[in-house]
Amino acid sequence: MAKVAVLGYGTVGSGIVEVINTNQELIAKRVGCPVEVKYILDLRDFPGDPYENLVVHDVDVIMNDPEVEIVCEAMGGTGAAYAFTKAALSKGKSVCTSNKALVAEYGTELIELAKANKCNYLFEASCGGGIPIIRPLRTSLSPEKIVAIKGILNGTTNYILTRMEQEGADFDSVLKDAQALGYAEANPEADVEGHDACRKIAILSSLGFGKTVYYKDVYTEGITKIAMEDFAYMKQLKATIKLLGMSREVDGEYFAMVAPFVLTRENPLYNVDDVMNAILVTGNTLGDTMYYGAGAGKLPTASAVVSDVLECVLHKGIHLSSNWAPEKLALADAALAEWKFFVRVPKADEAKIQQTFGEVKMLESVKDGEAAFVTPVMSEKVYKEKAASLDVISMIRMEG
Ligand code: HSE
C-alpha cells in the first residue's frame, strides 16, 4: 500500500483525489500495490464531501506520519507551498505538483533537495496540463540536444484567442467563461499577461537545455492588446494569432520569449484551438516532435499529477535524474532575435512605410484611417529603430 497526502483541496487537489479513486483498481495493477489518499490538507472543512473525514488542518500530521511516502502539492503559490514542499522532501517524502510558479521559482533547489534525500520532486502537471511533456523531455528525448521548444502553453489565453477569432467575442466575457470552466489562474492576470506561460517555458527550457532558465530573464508580453482588427488582417495572411512560449538555440546563443505570434497555416501549432495546448520540441538528430492535449482543467491536470505519484511508487528510494542542472543559462538579448513583423500604422504614415522598411507586403486595410503591412525578416532591434519614425498602432511578431 502506498499512502498519499494531498495539500490543497481546490480544483486540482480534489481532481487528484478523484483520479486516484476512480482508477483505483487499474492503478493498483500497474504499480503492484494499492495507492490510497490518507490525508487532505486544507484550511477549510468540507461537510458532505465523500472524503471529508480525510481533511486535516495541521500539516505536521502529514509530515510526522511515516506511512505517507508521497505528497501532492496542489496549493499553488510560493509561500506555504514552498515551506511544505521543503519539509516533505527533507523527510524523504516525494512531492508531485502542478504548481508551475513554485517549480519555476525554486525548482533547482527542490530537485537538489529531493536528490539529497533519495526521493523525487516531480512536476509533469506544471506545463501543458494533462500533456505528457516533462517525462518525454526527461527520458525519451534524453539522447537529443534540444535546439528549440515552441508551445501554446496557456489554455486560458488560447481559449480566449480562439473565441475572439471564431465568434468575434469580446475579451472580458470570454475570460469570465474561462474562469467558470476552471481554466484560469486565481488571478487571471497571470494568464492574460503571459506570466503563466513564462514560468512554463522557463521550466521546459531548464529541462531541455540542461541549465536553469530563470523566468525573470524571459521577455514576456501578454494578449491584452490583441484586437478584433488584428484577426481581420489574419484572414488575408491565412494566419492566426497565438500566445507562444518559445526558446531556441541559435549559433550557441539561447533565446527565450513569451508573446503573441502570427502563425500561418503551415505551422504545426496553427490548429491548436480552445483550451488545448501543444508543444513542438526540436532535437538535433530527431527533428520535430509535437505533444498535444488539454492544457488546463481539473481532471487533465490531476491525471498528470497522479502519473507522477505512480512514478514515485514504482521508484521508491530512487531519485529519478533529470537534465536540469543548477547552473544558470545566460539568455541572449531578445531584441537580437529575428522575425517578420505584422504592423498597423495610421493612414497618414502610409507613404513612409516602404521608405522605412523597404520591400514590405502591404495588406488591404480593414479599418478606416489605418494601413497594415508585413516587414521583411529583421532583428527586433532594427525593427524598433525603423518603427520609431512611424506612429505604430500595433505590432505582432510572425513565427516561422
Ligand atoms: N491557467 C492555466 C492555463 C492553468 O490556463 O493554462 C494550467 O496551467
Image (cartoon, rainbow, N blue to C red):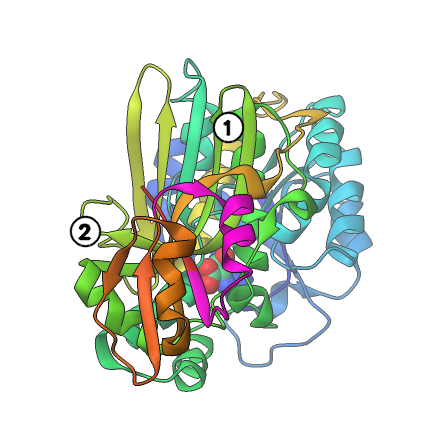
At mark 1, the secondary structure is helix
The mark found on residue 282 in the picture is: none
Q: Residues within 10 Å of mark 2 (few under 14, many from 20)?
A: few
Residue displayed at 35% across by 77% down? 370
Percent from the top left, x then y, of residue 79? 78, 57
Kind of residue sitting beneath label 2: Arg
Q: Considering depth in this image, is 275 or 341 the residue closer to the camera?
A: 341
Percent from the top left, x then y, of residue 182? 45, 72
Picture quadrant where residue 280 is located: top left
Percent from the top left, x then y, of residue 305? 49, 47
Please give the residue where the numbered disc 1 appears in the rendered image: 208
Kind of residue sitting beneath label 1: Gly
| Whether residue 356 is situated above or below residue 177 in the rendered picture | above
Residue displayed at 44% across by 78% down? 175
Picture quadrant where residue 109 is located: top right
Q: Is residue 194 left or right of residue 60?
A: left
- Work out whether mark 1 precedes mark 2 in sequence or the reverse, and give the earlier one: 1
Please give the residue where the numbered disc 2 appears in the rendered image: 265
Magenta stretch? 376-395
Please tell me whether mark 1 or mark 2 is closer to you in this view: 2
Magenta segment: does it hold 383? yes
Q: Is residue 356 left or right of residue 272?
A: right
Q: Considering depth in this image, is 2 or 396 the residue closer to the camera?
A: 396
Percent from the top left, x then y, of residue 152? 39, 52
